[in-house]
Image (tube, rainbow, N blue to C red):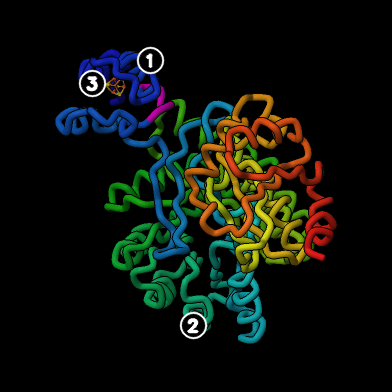
Amino acid sequence: MALTGVEIFKLLPKTNCKKCGQPTCLAFAMKLAQRQVSLDQCPDVSEEAKQKLGEASAPPIRPVSLGAGAKAVKMGEEMVLFRHEKKFVNPCAFAVEIKDTLSAADAARKIEEAAASEIDRVGQKLRVDALFLSNDSGDAAKFLELAKLAAARAPEMPVIVSTTSPDAAEASLGQFAGKKAVLYGANAGNLQAMAEKAKAAKATLGIAAKDIDELCELTEKAKALGIEDMVLDSGARSAGEILRDNTYIRRAALKKNFKPLGYPVITFANRPGDTLLEALVAGLAVEKYASIVVLGTAEKWKNLALFSLRQNIYTDPQVPMQVQQKIYKIGEPGPKAPFMITTNFSLTYFIVSGEVENSKVPCRLAVMDSEGLSVLTAWAAGKFTASKIAQFITESGVEGELEQKELIIPGYVAILSGAIEDKLAGWKITVGPREANGIPAFLKARAV
Ligand code: SF4
């Protein structure tokens, strides 16, 4: 049974040190009781207390991995219903369905399309994360061929093996040993056998229920059979059912600490022949609590829309996206190359660096930590000042790489040029364009 806030408080260090981000240990205990924080946020809690807190410290939605290695995906561990309360933690995985009724050539093409889906957006690598291998034929031999094809063509991609046949499951899971696959398809008729196959292969068990009531029964039975890692399918398929069931599951796990539903959710957005509807349903699943979203296809237009949505939903709305403070080299700048500065708001960096690349003029770009604010906002907030710029440039050591000590500042902060010259002895400060789209012409004009 869950502990109350006061019971948890008795087990905390009671130093009110605030390292957990809460004003007092009691405040932390109350939040822990409501699943709004995790115990590991208190660095001083004793091992004994950790043990005693037991379930109270366990995340309400069990963390489960999909895949292994660099492309592994983490699921679960969510703590809130709404991202304005606290950021959503583990971005959902997109999985593309590959049916074993496809010809080998068509299946290979789809697998390779999914494996080649990666794009770079504001500094993050975004991709279709997994393959959903579907035993549509019901033929174990065909399914094994598909599993072999996937293992050969996309060896790093996480895999969800979908079948209701324990024998087909065993054979195909053998292709993904050590890769933490999901075995999806455990239902009321095959649960015990599928649980055994999942345990033997160290796979996560995907529960395929008809409705929420059956889902609760099946997860409890699977738990009794020794299954720890599960993903949940309530049987919802229409957009309305997905919204209803996914919300119910998340709410029950977080607000009621209802363990039978405390696992990541798999949602089926695939709509054969209607990719536009598929994109819409997948968008709903991204926003409403799916940890795996199954798609029918991986077209680039749809990927871009869904990747962008996921990236935005899973960023912290209270923290602007930022890039690392440092001197970035664009092209191969020599000692005479221009040296520019901007702030570390991701969008600012990627727009500015993109325009520098467009100019084809090799350049050094100083990106200064402004806590993720754009140039004008950072200046107005006192985070992009002459003193701070001078300190950053001096400490960067870039001076030794330059023939002429000249710094190009954004046109929007031309007002800082005199003050920076005062702080940076021996430097010439040049005012660059106000807008990033003026950078190519500006740099090319200097290069002639
Ligand atoms: S970090 Fe731990 S000891 Fe410090 S205030 Fe938070 S709960 Fe108390």
Instruction: Say the numbered circle drawn on residue 12.
Output: 3
Vertical side of 416 occupied by 119: above or below: below
Q: What secondary structure is marked by label 3? A: loop
Cβ(mark 1) to ligand 1 < 8 Å? yes
For residue 263, above or below residue 32: below
Q: Residue at x 35, y 25 (%)?
A: 20
- Tag 1: amino acid: Pro
Magenta span includes 372? no
Whether ligand 1 has any atom under 8 Å from the Cβ at mark 2 is answered as no
Q: Residue at x 73, y 53 (%)?
A: 305
Q: Is residue 242 something that shows in the picture?
A: no
Give the amino acid type for the residue marked by disc 2 in the picture. Answer: Ala
Residue beneath disc 2: 152
The magenta segment? 33-37
For numbered disc 2, what is the local secondary structure?
A: helix
Q: Nearer the viewer, mark 2 or mark 3?
A: 3
